[in-house]
Amino acid sequence: MKKILLITLLFFLSPVYAEELQGGVTYDVNSARAYVQDGQISDIGQQSNLYYSNNGSTDDIIYGYSANNVPECFTVRYNDDLTRDYIYGMNNKLLYVIKNDRPTTEFPHRGYRYNTKGKLINTTLMTSKNNGFTFSPSGKLLGRLIGGVGYLGNTNIVIGSQSN
């Protein structure tokens, strides 16, 4: 089971908005926004009572850490549906569900993060394993992942990195 630093919860803003990310197709912020919003799923229903249990049916578990390197959550992808990711708190209670338009090993793919009441929280476009965009439900750019590194705001402040 791979354990890597989680940046898929939120991708952070890049200092360069005009930069293009590639994944078989080249995207800039505007074309990525249009592509993600075009595939938006309207509803996944309530999912509030799902608790994680380690029963061996997982494809991958990805841990998310705070700035102090303390585990805060983990993302689970189950073998029976590689297009959904379930994000749990460290108490094993479900926090979010991400519905992807194709398996996360295929690029590009769009992801739609919902809370447990079925409300859309954000959308993503992953152009490759280490490159992507995150948008608000209304299409505002929230973040960028470039080469496995997230950026905060309109600055060069590095937020985190991904390791294998």
Image: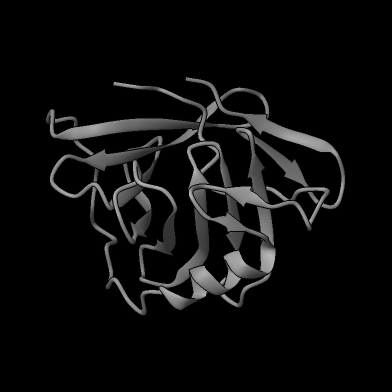
Residue 37, given in percent of the width and then of the height, sits at 50, 75
Above-or-below relation of 71 to 139 = above
Residue 49, given in percent of the width and then of the height, sits at 24, 57
Quadrant that contains the N terminus: top left
**Observer-nearest of 40 and 90:** 40
Q: How many marks?
A: 0
Residue 64, given in percent of the width and then of the height, sits at 50, 33
The quarter of the displayed image where residue 55 is located: top left
The quarter of the displayed image where residue 89 is located: top left
Question: Is 21 on the left or on the right of 120, as rendered?
Answer: right
Question: Is 89 on the left or on the right of 20, as rendered?
Answer: left
**Observer-nearest of 148 and 67:** 148
Question: Is 125 on the left or on the right of 30, as rendered?
Answer: left
The structure residue drawn at horizontal position 60% and vertical position 33%, both measured from the top left corner, is: 148
The structure residue drawn at horizontal position 20% and vertical position 34%, both measured from the top left corner, is: 58
Q: How is the image coloured?
A: one colour
The structure residue drawn at horizontal position 13% and vertical position 34%, both measured from the top left corner, is: 57
Above-or-below relation of 106 to 141 = above
**Observer-nearest of 106 and 140:** 106
